Image (tube, rainbow, N blue to C red):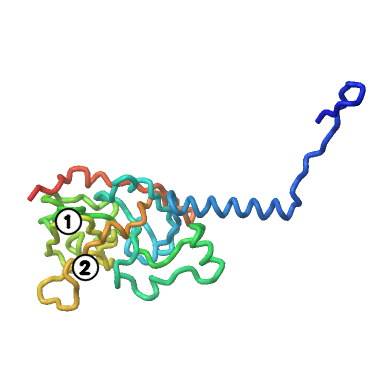
């Protein structure tokens, strides 16, 4: 800064900038980092883990995944073929699968999106509002709105299975899917307690009508990367097999 003398001349003065003590700077940086992590989790990306073998062979139990939420902003909603994470609609998870982070530190990390949280499921969207899903055609393929899906690149039939929907057998039909909901299945079809298992089939009394559909409001986001372990790292994309499925016919 400058100081004016009594004779009118100007004298330059050096003024050292004041710095915060190191401990205060550290706390400030931590607060900023925490705020950014919370913001990112709330609107952009969140970490989860695969709770079971239901999404094999692509996603293995305990794999760490990242979910992006941007795709479902501004009226966007899950599309056929998306792998989505959603909150348990009620009774879909076993006790072991619903367990979250094991201690206080990891629970805090989970709340800010830095550690996978529990109480969620990971499945593939097979049907959206209005769709009718049927299992199966003569080649054992699941059909959506009359179009058979070629799922051999990502789904697993299971030991001795005749079709890609064997958890409850190869002869069933679901839909039309109600507005605001989706119909989901695990890729490991013989080991996935998904929408098919919660259907009220003939003779069943221990189910809730419509309980096979997942409300879109419970969907956290779409899985876009398999992050860990390192040797499993890959980007996830919507399979081409869903491209030919037509929209449901208007009633």
Does the image show residue 70? yes
The secondary element bearing badge 2 is classed as loop
Tell me the quadrant of the picture where the N terminus can be found.
top right
> Which quadrant of the view contains residue 62?
bottom left
Residue 7, placed above or below residue 224 = above
Q: Tell which residue pokes out farthest to the right in this image.
A: 7
Spatial CA span between label 1 and label 2: 20 Å
Q: Report if the CB atoms under discs 1 and 2 are less than 8 Å apart.
A: no
Residue 142's tag is: 1
Residue that carries the numbered disc 2 in the rendered image: 211
Report the front residue among 165 and 42: 42
Residue shown at the point (48%, 68%) measured from the top left: 101
Classify residue 110 as left or right of residue 140. right
- Categorize mark 2 by other alpha carbons within 10 Å: few (<14), some (14-19), many (20+): some
Does the image show residue 232? no
Classify residue 1 as left or right of residue 218. right
- Categorize mark 1 by other alpha carbons within 10 Å: few (<14), some (14-19), many (20+): many
> Which quadrant of the view contains residue 220?
bottom left
Residue shown at the point (22%, 62%) measured from the top left: 213
Classify residue 60 as left or right of residue 12. left
User: In the image, residue 42 lies at what x, y percent?
Assistant: 44, 53
Task: Return the disc, 1 or 2, that comes first in the chain's sequence.
Answer: 1
Residue shown at the point (35%, 58%) measured from the top left: 85
């Amino acid at each position: 800064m400058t100081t004016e003398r009594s004779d009118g001349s100007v004298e330059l003065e050096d003024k050292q900038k004041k710095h915060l003590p190191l401990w205060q700077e550290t706390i400030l940086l931590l607060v900023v980092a925490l705020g950014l992590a919370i913001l990112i989790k709330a609107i952009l990306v969140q970490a989860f883990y695969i709770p079971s073998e239901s999404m094999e062979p692509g996603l293995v139990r305990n794999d760490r995944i990242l979910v992006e939420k941007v795709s479902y902003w501004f009226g966007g909603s899950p599309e056929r073929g998306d792998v989505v994470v959603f909150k348990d609609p009620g009774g879909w998870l076993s006790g072991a699968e619903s367990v979250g982070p094991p201690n206080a530190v990891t629970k805090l990390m989970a709340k800010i999106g830095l550690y996978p949280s529990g109480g969620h499921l990971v499945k593939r969207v097979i049907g959206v509002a209005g769709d009718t899903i049927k299992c199966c055609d003569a080649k054992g393929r699941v059909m959506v709105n009359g179009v058979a899906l070629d799922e051999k690149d990502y789904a697993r039939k299971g030991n001795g299975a005749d079709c890609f929907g064997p958890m409850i057998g190869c002869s069933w039909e679901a839909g039309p899917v109600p507005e605001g909901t989706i119909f989901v299945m695990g890729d490991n079809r013989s080991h996935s307690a998904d929408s098919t298992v919660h259907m009220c089939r003939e003779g069943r009394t221990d189910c809730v009508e419509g309980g096979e559909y997942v409300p879109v409001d419970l969907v956290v986001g779409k899985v876009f990367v398999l992050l860990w372990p390192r040797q499993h790292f890959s980007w996830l994309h919507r399979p081409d097999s869903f491209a030919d499925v037509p929209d449901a016919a208007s009633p």
